Image (cartoon, rainbow, N blue to C red):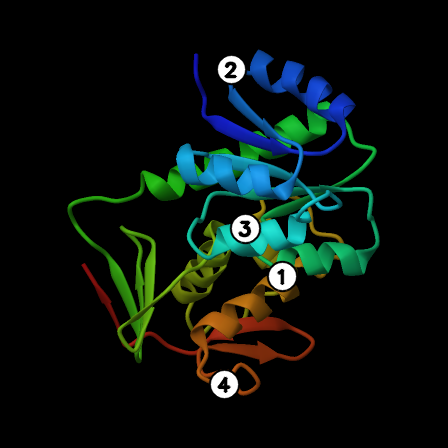
Amino acid sequence: MKHGTILLVDDEADIIKLMQVFLQNEGYRLLTASNGKQALEWVEKESVDLIILDIMMPVMDGLQVCMKIREEHQMPIIFLSAKGQEIDKITGLSLGADDYVTKPFSPLELIARVKSQLRRYNNYASNGSSNEEQMVIDDLVINISTHEVTVDGNVVKLTPREFAILELLARNQGLVLSMEQIYENVWKDTYMDSNNTVMVHIRKIREKIEPNPRAPKFIKTIWGVGYKIDKIEGIRK
C-alpha cells in the first residue's frame, strides 16, 4: 500500500541504504538524492509528500535547498543533521523546516516523525469543504477550508505548522496561550522548558503577516505568559 512519496536527501550512502529499508517497509515510495541540486530537480518533476533533508551536503547545502523549496512548495521538511546545537535547530526551523533530527538518530524515531508530519499535512489538505470558513482579523483573512492566508488581499505562504499556530491563536482570540500550550496543541508532543521552537515559528509568522514585525499588529506577546490575538471582527462561513 502506498502511503506517500518521500524524498530522502543525504550524501551518506549508508544512511540512504538504512532508511530505504525502513521507509519502503512502511509502504512509502522513496526518491533519493545525494546533493541539493538533485533534490530540487526531483521536487520539480515529481509530486513529493515529504522531504528528509541533510544540511551538510556538496553542491548546495540543505539550508539553501529548504529556502528554495519554500518559495513554491509547502510539503513538510525534516532536517537531518550532525549539528545538534540549539542555534543550528533554530536556524533550520526559521528557514521553513517542520522538524529537526540530530545524527546519530534512531530510524524508528525518524519514521514516527515522518508519520506525524504526513498525518498533520494530509489533515490540512483534506480539511477543505464546500462550506468555506474564514476568520477575519482586520485585513488578515485566514481561510480554514483552503488553508490560505491573505493580508490586505495579498496571499501569504505559511508552512503547515505556521498555519496551525496562527489558526490556534485565531480560534482562541482574546486568550493568552503559553508556549507550552501552543507546542502541545500543534506538535502533539511534550514541551521542554528549553525548547525555543514556538518562539522561532512565531517570529517567522510575524515576518510574513505583520506590516511591522517589531510592533506586531496581530500576534501580541504577553511577556512571561505567552501569545495572543486580541480579537476577530468576524468568522465567515
Question: In this view, which residue lies farthest toward the front?
Answer: 59
Q: Looking at the picture, does residue 70 appear above or below residue 29?
A: below
Point 54% across, 22% down: residue: 30
Q: Marks 1/3: CA distance?
A: 19 Å
Q: Marks 1/4: CA distance?
A: 18 Å
Q: Secondary structure at mark 3?
A: helix
Q: Which residue is mark 1?
A: 94
Q: Earlier in the sequence, mark 2 or mark 3?
A: 2
Q: Which residue is mark 3?
A: 185
Q: Earlier in the sequence, mark 3 or mark 4?
A: 3
Give the camera-side residue of 50 and 218.
Answer: 50
Q: Which mark is residue 27?
A: 2
Q: Secondary structure at mark 2?
A: loop
For disc 3, the neighbor class at 10 Å (few under 14, some 14 to 19, many from 20) is some
- Name the kind of residue labelled 2 in the image: Gly
Q: Marks 2/1: CA distance?
A: 31 Å
Q: Which residue is mark 4?
A: 212
Give the camera-side residue of 122 and 54.
Answer: 54
The x and y percentages for residue 97 are 59, 51
Q: Is mark 1 in CB contact (under 8 Å) with mark 4?
A: no
The x and y percentages for residue 24 are 57, 15
- Name the kind of residue labelled 4 in the image: Asn
Point 45% across, 63% down: residue: 166
Q: Earlier in the sequence, mark 1 or mark 3?
A: 1
